[in-house]
Image: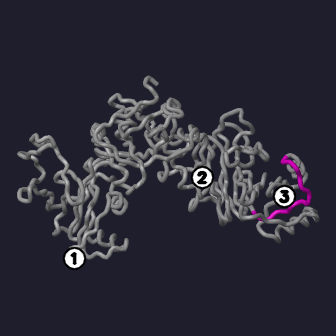
């Protein structure tokens, strides 16, 4: 790699502030396999289609708590679908609730004999028209047909001469595997509360399989969790393969290799430290921006794969443990302390805001890098009222406090009665659709006066001002110093307000995203300057190592 895997960060611009690191038991700070939620909650599916891309056929079984796959059976079919055991129909290539061209019913005929293996049940099923093996809470059966009503099943029982068969339904945990487009059942699984169907593409492990699902290609296997409703679909995938499916969706696959490597390490570290928010749904991370974008291999290329492979197993570490590695598209010139964005009280000192001199290299080529959002004062009042604040007409708005990197730390609104309400930048970014947390509140009058000795004042200029040091020396003040106020420290000239006579408030900013952690555009700019991925990561994350 040309440089040591582990290199301590230089303290670049300011003392660190924090977002806490995740603590792991010694020797267990990483995981080799992830459960990635593809469809869940409101997006859960009545049915899910799979098609082999690399490899052939499928193995059926279940995954234990260690994500080890336990095989129950298999099929040589190359196109299969998993459907909930309710009446579903094929429409537009997908299984749905409602009407369609092919229906898979939820009533079956069950033969009285039980079997000790999939092979025995499959052999017995082959002797009956529309027969298929079923694994019902640890026991193999042969079931016949997929009927929409009990009456239809009884009619089939008579027609087939299966007088000893019983008409059965299934529990709310059950799923059926069918041949896509035909609706013909080839396996049914009901593991009750304890087990969910797992499918491992390929008939063995001789090839590294790739599977089409919903227009995207994925490594790994799939799990189908169900509790009375639609299917939660989970991709069970090796961590490094997961990163290959994240990288080209979080960063352009044409960007410099060192930027891609920084993103790969960021994404890998984030994946192993962000595994609790979806635990109740049965998976570690989701596949969208709530966690990080993951859509398989469609956009992966040699460059993105190289970035993952050349950093395999590497993490951003704070005090030896994997750190939480937030990142956003563009910081607009400075990142921000996590505590100022999400009011974090956790001990996360590696997420300290830094002034970013690199993004400016690319500002002219970044769409909407500089932006303006205008919000009427009546809309602001309505928003506050909807959140439970008893405010009147808004007459003023201003940045009351800036952070050490020049981002707004507190924004205050004033109503006609003189009442004030103050909020952090992330709240306003969400409420009013601002593009980033680096902005000013503009529109008119300025209130950035600081008093000296109770009589004189300094506005935005420090020309002619002097400071007495602790050793008694006197020196001229230069640059943009900090001042101490009743509300804390802030940059000189930090508070500016809109004119009370206007009808709107204008937010003027730069960048895109939450401003915490690594800037992706900044990483790109640093790489274009010839810096490597460790330079990038140790710039954006304070006091960390990479290794």
Q: Nearer the viewer, residue 181 or 310?
A: 310
- Secondary structure category for the residue under label 2: loop
- Sequence order check: which comes first, mark 3 or mark 1? 3
Q: Residues within 10 Å of mark 2 (few under 14, many from 20)?
A: many
Q: Residues within 10 Å of mark 1 (few under 14, many from 20)?
A: few
Q: Does residue 275 appear to the left or right of 155 in the view shown?
A: left
Residue under numbered circle 1: 417
Q: Does residue 339 appear to the left or right of 155 in the view shown?
A: left
Q: Residue at x 37, y 37 (%)?
A: 523
- Secondary structure category for the residue under label 1: loop
Q: Does residue 313 appear to the left or right of 501 in the view shown?
A: right
**Residue 177's x, y, as percent?**
74, 53
Rounded to the nearest angstrom, the CA distance separating label 3 from label 2 is 31 Å
Task: Establish if 288 lies above or below 211.
Answer: below
Q: Nearer the viewer, mark 3 or mark 1?
A: 1
Task: Establish if 387 lies above or below 511.
Answer: below
**Residue 169's x, y, as percent?**
79, 65
Whether the magenta-drawn stretch holds residue 67 is answered as no
Asked if one can make out residue 469 in the rendered structure from this viewpoint, the answer is yes
Q: Main secondary structure of the magenta part?
A: loop
Residue under numbered circle 3: 143
Residue under numbered circle 2: 283
Task: Establish if 7 lies above or below 114.
Answer: above
Rounded to the nearest angstrom, the CA distance separating label 1 from label 2 is 50 Å
What span is colored magenta in the figure? 105-118
Asked if the residue at tag 2 contacts the one at tag 1, i.e. Cβ–Cβ closer than 8 Å, the answer is no
Rounded to the nearest angstrom, the CA distance separating label 3 from label 1 is 74 Å
């Amino acid at each position: 790699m040309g440089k040591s895997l582990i290199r301590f960060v230089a303290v670049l611009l300011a003392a660190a502030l924090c977002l806490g690191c995740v603590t792991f038991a010694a020797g267990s700070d990483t995981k080799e396999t992830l459960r990635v939620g593809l469809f869940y909650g409101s997006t859960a599916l009545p049915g899910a289609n799979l098609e082999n891309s690399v490899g052939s056929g499928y193995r059926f079984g279940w995954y234990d708590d260690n994500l080890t796959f336990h095989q129950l059976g298999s099929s040589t079919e190359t196109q299969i679908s998993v459907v909930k055991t309710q009446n579903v129909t094929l429409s537009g290539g997908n299984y749905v609730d409602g009407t369609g061209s092919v229906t898979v019913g939820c009533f079956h005929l069950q033969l009285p004999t039980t079997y000790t293996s999939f092979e025995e049940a499959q052999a017995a099923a082959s002797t009956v028209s529309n027969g298929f093996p079923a694994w019902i809470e640890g026991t193999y059966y042969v079931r016949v047909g997929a009927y929409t009503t009990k009456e239809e099943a009884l009619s089939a029982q008579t027609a087939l001469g299966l007088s000893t068969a019983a008409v059965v339904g299934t529990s709310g945990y059950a799923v059926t595997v069918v041949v896509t487009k035909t609706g013909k059942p080839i396996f049914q699984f009901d593991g009750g509360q304890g087990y969910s169907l797992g499918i491992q593409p390929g008939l063995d492990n001789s090839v590294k399989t790739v599977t089409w699902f919903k227009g995207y290609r994925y490594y790994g296997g799939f799990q189908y969790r169900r509790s009375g409703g639609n299917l939660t679909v989970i991709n069970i995938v090796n961590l490094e393969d997961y990163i290959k499916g994240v990288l080209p969706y979080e960063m352009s696959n044409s960007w410099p290799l060192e930027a891609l490597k920084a993103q790969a390490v960021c994404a890998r570290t984030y994946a192993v430290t962000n595994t609790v928010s979806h635990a109740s749904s049965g998976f570690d991370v989701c596949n969208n921006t709530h966690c990080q974008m993951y859509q398989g291999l469609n956009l992966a290329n040699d460059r993105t794969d190289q970035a993952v492979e050349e950093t395999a197993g590497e993490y951003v570490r704070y005090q030896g443990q994997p750190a939480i590695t937030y990142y956003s598209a563009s910081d607009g010139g400075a990142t921000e302390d996590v505590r100022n964005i999400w009011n974090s009280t956790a001990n996360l000192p590696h997420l300290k805001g830094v002034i970013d001199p690199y993004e400016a290299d690319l500002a002219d080529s970044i769409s909407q890098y500089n932006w303006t959002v205008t919000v009427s004062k009546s809309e602001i009042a309505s928003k506050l009222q909807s959140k439970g604040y008893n405010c009147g007409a808004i007459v003023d708005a201003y940045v009351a406090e800036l952070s050490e990197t020049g981002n707004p730390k507190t924004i205050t609104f004033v109503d006609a009665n003189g009442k004030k309400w103050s909020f952090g930048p992330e709240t306003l970014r969400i409420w009013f659709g601002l593009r980033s947390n680096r902005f000013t509140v503009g529109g008119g009058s300025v209130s950035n006066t600081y008093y000296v000795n109770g009589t004189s004042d300094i506005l935005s200029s420090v020309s002619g001002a002097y400071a007495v040091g602790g050793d008694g020396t006197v020196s001229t003040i230069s640059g943009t110093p900090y001042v101490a106020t009743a509300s804390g420290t802030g940059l000189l000239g930090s508070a500016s307000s809109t004119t009370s006579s206007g009808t709107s408030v204008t937010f003027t900013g730069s960048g895109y995203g939450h401003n915490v952690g690594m800037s992706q555009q900044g990483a790109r700019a640093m790489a274009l300057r010839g810096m490597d991925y460790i330079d990038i990561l140790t710039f954006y994350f304070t006091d960390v190592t990479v290794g």
